[in-house]
Amino acid sequence: MDQELFLKTFAALFAIMSPIANLPVFLALTSDRGPAFERKVAFTLLISLTAGSVVIGLSGDIILKVFGISLDAFRLAGGFLILLIALDLISGQSTKAHHGSSKEKENMKSQDNPAIYPLTVPVLLGPGSISTMIIFRGQVHNTSQEIAYVAAVAAAIALLIATFFAAPFLSRFLGETANSVMSRLMGMILAAIAMEMMTGSLKVLLPGLA
């Protein structure tokens, strides 16, 4: 297994999906309806995230080819988008790309089961995480890298779902301080990954810069 690809993919997805930072969102949408409902939403979320990740992994290259977009051009745009998300995390703000506008947030509260919308899309499988999956999927060229990519996505989803299943327990110990620290830490990691994506793509698109 390609450990470097595994670590980069896992770190990027973990930072964007950020289980601890998104735990308050999960609780806000489910806690008033009891632990049984929380488990139901978490299980539905597991299925929807897995299905969504499979679709993205299989169709990402096809989408780029249909629109005539090179992987490096997409990597530059995706890196810039991820950098904006990282800056929001560092400043302690929720990004509209993943958490929606004020009008969308009001609509989110009225959902009977928030697992698909808004938790899967756009909170967890939003523009940032979709771009990350497509970019790293484009770097897969052999079986070792294929295993690393699948393992990284599976590990990120598993850790996220485990956090949500343990939400009633974790909510007793994790306060605003832990959430703030985690948000800024994930923001720094995500910013570094975004810069690497952007500089890597610029070296290919503009070789004179190298």
Image (cartoon, helix red, strand yellow):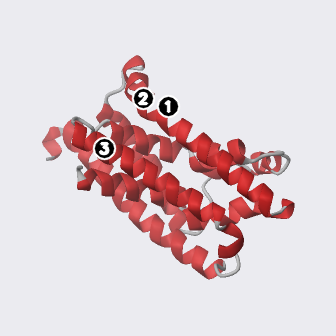
Q: Helix, strand or loop at disc 3?
A: helix
Q: Which dot marks residue 147?
A: 3
At label 3, the amino acid type is Ile
Residue at mark 1 to residue at mark 2: CA–CA distance: 5 Å
Residue in front for this viewpoint, 62 or 164: 164
Q: Residues within 10 Å of mark 2 (few under 14, many from 20)?
A: few
Give the foreground label among 3 and 1: 3
Say if residue 75 shows up in the picture.
no
Q: Position of residue 67 (x, y in %)?
A: 42, 20
Q: Position of residue 160 (x, y in %)?
A: 55, 58
Q: Position of residue 53 (x, y in %)?
A: 49, 39
Q: Residue at x 14, y 47 (%)?
A: 210
Q: Residues within 10 Å of mark 3 (few under 14, many from 20)?
A: some
Residue at mark 2 to residue at mark 3: CA–CA distance: 14 Å
Q: Which dot marks residue 58?
A: 2
Q: Residue at x 58, y 49 (%)?
A: 124
Q: Helix, strand or loop at disc 1?
A: helix
Q: Are marks 2 and 3 in contact (CB under 8 Å)?
A: no
Q: Are marks 1 and 2 in contact (CB under 8 Å)?
A: yes
Q: Is residue 56 above or below residue 21?
A: above
